[in-house]
Image (spheres, helix red, strand yellow):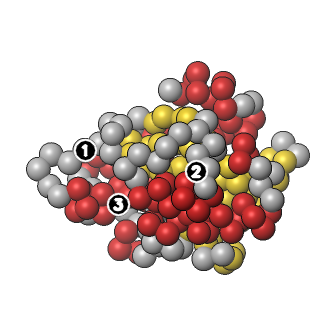
Amino acid sequence: MYLIVGLGNPEKDYSKTRHNMGFNVVNKLSEKYNIPVNIKKFNSLYGTGILNNEKIILVKPQTYMNLSGEAVRDFVNYYKIELDKLLVIYDDIDLEPGVIRIRKSGGPGTHNGMKSVVECLNDENFARIRVGIGKPNNENLIEYVIGAIDEEDIEKLSIGVTTAADAVDEILNNNIDIAMNKYN
């Protein structure tokens, strides 16, 4: 059983922001696998399906980003998910828009949602896909990640979302090492 979690902020005002790349990837996977993500549980929206005879749970925590770990922890505990079957997807300012990075484990960096996940799980040994959003030029970081996206970046970010969804597919169909070699 795989638990695939996309990090984002739940309110409609944030739906088209850089901080919602994780939600956007889960939405893309929802369409691709025909798994509606519309059931409420553990302060999240989720959906389940089967791929290659393995259950998949797609999750979008509905807490704010800084509390995402609570929802992840609740799903991990309830479904008894081994951490090698957990995949967290989130935005990263240290990567250019459209670029992704896959890692088997590691620290949360500066991302508050990942800090919450690592803290709530008390573990860093789970896979993650970082979706690049780039750094702000002259604007405040908070405004940059939750503010409006200019037309030029929308296209680049869309490429990153599609690439991240393809990478998830590679992980599920083959394994994370193959996905890392192909997409990193």
Which residue appears at 41% of the width and 58% of the height? Answer: 112
Q: Which residue lies under the disc numbered 2? A: 88
Residue 103: x and y in percent read 56, 35
Residue 83: x and y in percent read 71, 48
The answer to whether residue 144 is visible is: yes
Q: Is label 1 or label 3 in front?
A: 1
Count of numbered labels shown in the rendering: 3
Task: Tell whether label 3 touches label 1 (CB within 8 Å).
Answer: no
Residue 58: x and y in percent read 67, 59
Q: Above or below — where is 71 with respect to 29?
A: below
| Mark found first going from the N terminus, 1 or 3 | 3
| Mark found first going from the N terminus, 1 or 2 | 2
Residue 94: x and y in percent read 33, 39
Horizontal side of residue 169 vs 135, given as left or right: right
Instruction: Point out the residue furthest to the top here.
Output: 181
Helix, strand or loop for disc 2: strand
Q: Nearer the viewer, residue 59 or 163?
A: 59
Horizontal side of residue 182 vs 150, given as left or right: right
- Name the residue type under label 2: Val
| Mark found first going from the N terminus, 2 or 3 | 3
Q: Which residue lies under the disc numbered 1? A: 135
Q: Which mark is residue 17?
A: 3
| Alpha carbons under labels 1 and 2: distance apart | 21 Å
Which residue appears at 15% of the width and 46% of the height? Answer: 137
Horizontal side of residue 164 vs 146, given as left or right: right
Which residue appears at 53% of the width and 73% of the height? Answer: 62
Instruction: Point out the residue furthest to the left here.
Output: 138
| Residue 170, picture quadrant | top right
Q: Nearer the viewer, residue 120 or 92?
A: 120
